[in-house]
Amino acid sequence: MKLLFTLEALFVMDVAGDALLRRQWQPQPPSCATGPRLNAQAAQDAATQYCQNLIDNKVVLSDSTQNPAPGIQQGKAENGGSMALVVMFDQSSCPTDQNTSTLDFSAMGLDTCFENLYTNIQLVCSQDSTWGSYDPDWTILGGTFGNSCGLFSLYGQ
């Protein structure tokens, strides 16, 4: 059996040469927010704390459970605004192979939760010195990232 990879799908060729298409879900880049910007260090600390709280409380989300309360930190966004951290179950971001239909934070672990809630958003939704309105204290735009049956949001309000 040969494995042929593309960016969008995994094709498996059987012995007779027939292609069997197995679609693999690929996370999309985060959607960036337009609210007040966030301080990178404060956002990192908040994401770590929020993820650890979800793990400590053994939160498991599915289409039949209630999403956890958002984490709100007053005064942690530009111009005295608040920082919000939100995680929601999202069936459309579950792998298409149906191998999981829940979002279990204990199984996910702190590193992966932090990557989904902060790192992936920060990589796409941040400003550097090439931006006209650049301020080194407020570099994170915030955004939403869908992965592993969840929507992970970090934004200023």
Image: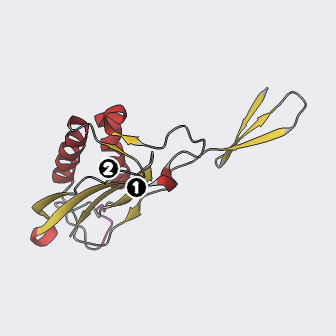
On the rendered structure, is 10 left or right of 43?
Answer: right
Q: Is residue 132 magenta?
A: yes
Mark 2 nearby-residue class (10 Å; few <14, some 14–19, many ≥20): many
Name which quarter of the figure residue 31 lies in.
Answer: bottom left
Mark 1 nearby-residue class (10 Å; few <14, some 14–19, many ≥20): many
Residue 104 position, x and y percent, is 36, 39
- Residue at label 2? 117
Residue 1 position, x and y percent, is 79, 26
- Residue at label 1? 145
Q: Residue at x 60, y 41 (%)?
A: 97
Q: Nearer the viewer, residue 100 or 48?
A: 100
Q: Nearer the viewer, residue 35 or 90?
A: 90
Q: Quadrant of the C terminus?
A: bottom left
Residue 151 position, x and y percent, is 39, 55
Residue type at mark 2: give it: Leu
Q: By what rule are the colours in the image chosen?
A: secondary structure
What residue span does the magenta drawing correspond to? 127-133
